[in-house]
């Protein structure tokens, strides 16, 4: 294995994988090496470009900490997250479709009772989110958990505000015996994915905007059923057709209906205009 050239170098590197004990790892690495070399050949990569790529990946790594995951953001904005998602969640018709997790989910969100407000004290117009968690046959699933999180009306998640302690704008609600859940929040707004790091720079270089359409995240789980990681998106948002992370699906777009002050459906008397949004989640039975 000497005197390797641009024609036989790829085969020499691939041959080195033959002693890898894990067959799946060998398959994945073989594909990575094949495509990486093919890309370098296809574009006739210069040394300066290769060094710029290394600097970029170094900057992505340096931007990561316990609150910021720039590699997830990179995967999301390149469509890799949604491709992995699509291939791993070929859900049956009627099941709630999945979409990207994103970097702002935080484990250990507070438990909330139905009717609680996840956005108390945050800027935004009040919104009552209600719905059911149902089986594929349309039967209610009692005790299903919705782990929800969202940005406020200024487009910021709790973890993006340095003055906040603890978990806010997020919580876990459970369905009642009728499979119903409801909670108060604020109407979400469109917001840009973080652009103050290297991923923001390549979005700019690609001539792309960084915006996501307004949405509320949910991970819905129930014992005996397949979980789903998803969003509900606000109907009419200007970015539904150009989401920076390619996550929008028609089945997830819902109307935030505006109401004048008065009694809301859960009995709360509202002194200001408010919105209601309703969505039923469908979970398929767990795979055996
Ligand atoms: C989000 O919706 O929270 C999100 C998803 C992908 C990248 C950035 C943010
Ligand atoms: Fe989000």
Image (spheres, rainbow, N blue to C red):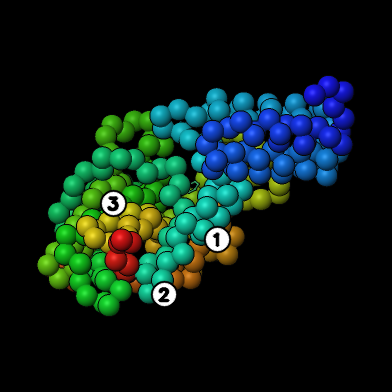
The mark closer to the camera, 1 or 3, is: 3
Q: Find out whether the residues at labels 2 and 3 contact each other: C-beta distance under 8 Å.
A: no
Q: Residue at x 66, y 44 (%)?
A: 31
Q: Which residue is mark 3?
A: 147
Residue 195 in the image: state x and y as whole percent: 57, 39
Please say whether residue 91 is visible from this viewpoint: yes
Residue 136 in the image: state x and y as whole percent: 30, 74
Please say whether residue 154 is visible from this viewpoint: no
The relative height of residue 109 versus residue 259 in the rendered view (above or below) is above
Taking the image as shown, residue 186 lies to the left or right of residue 101, namely left
Q: Residue at x 26, y 77 (%)?
A: 138
Disc 1/disc 3 C-alpha distance (Å): 24 Å
Report which quarter residue 32 is drawn in: top right
The mark closer to the camera, 1 or 2, is: 2
Rendered-image quadrant of the N terminus: top right
Determine which of the numbered discs, if any, sits on residue 210 in the image. Answer: none
Q: Residue furthest bottom?
A: 137
Q: Which residue is mark 2?
A: 93
Q: Earlier in the sequence, mark 1 or mark 2?
A: 2
The relative height of residue 257 versus residue 123 in the rendered view (above or below) is below
Using the image as rendered, state which of residue 176 and residue 194 is in the foreground. Answer: 176
Q: Which residue is mark 1?
A: 239
The relative height of residue 196 versus residue 269 in the rendered view (above or below) is above
Q: Find out whether the residues at labels 1 and 2 contact each other: C-beta distance under 8 Å.
A: no
């Amino acid at each position: 294995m000497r005197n390797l050239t641009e024609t036989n170098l790829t085969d020499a590197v691939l041959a080195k994988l033959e002693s890898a004990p894990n067959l799946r790892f060998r398959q994945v690495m073989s594909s990575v090496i094949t495509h990486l070399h093919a890309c370098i050949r296809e574009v006739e990569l210069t040394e300066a470009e290769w060094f710029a790529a290394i600097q970029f990946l170094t900057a992505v790594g340096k931007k990561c900490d316990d609150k910021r995951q720039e590699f997830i953001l990179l995967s999301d904005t390149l469509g890799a997250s949604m491709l992995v998602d699509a291939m791993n969640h070929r859900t049956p018709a009627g099941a709630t479709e999945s979409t990207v997790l994103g970097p702002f989910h935080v484990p250990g969100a507070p438990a909330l009772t139905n009717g609680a407000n996840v956005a108390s004290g945050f800027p935004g117009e009040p919104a009552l989110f209600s719905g059911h968690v149902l089986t594929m046959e349309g039967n209610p699933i009692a005790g299903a958990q919705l782990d929800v999180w969202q940005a406020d009306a200024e487009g910021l998640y709790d973890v993006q505000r340095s003055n906040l302690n603890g978990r806010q704008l997020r919580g876990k609600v459970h369905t009642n015996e009728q499979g119903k859940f409801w909670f108060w929040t604020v109407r979400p707004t469109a917001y840009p994915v973080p652009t103050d790091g290297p991923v923001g720079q390549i979005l700019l270089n690609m001539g792309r905007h960084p915006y996501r359409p307004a949405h509320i995240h949910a991970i819905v789980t129930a014992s005996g059923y397949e979980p789903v990681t998803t969003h509900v998106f606000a109907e009419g948002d200007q970015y539904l057709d150009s989401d920076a992370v390619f996550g929008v699906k028609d089945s997830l777009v819902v109307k935030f209906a505006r109401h004048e002050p008065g009694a809301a459906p859960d009995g709360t008397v509202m002194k200001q205009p408010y919105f209601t949004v309703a969505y039923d989640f469908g979970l398929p039975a767990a795979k055996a």
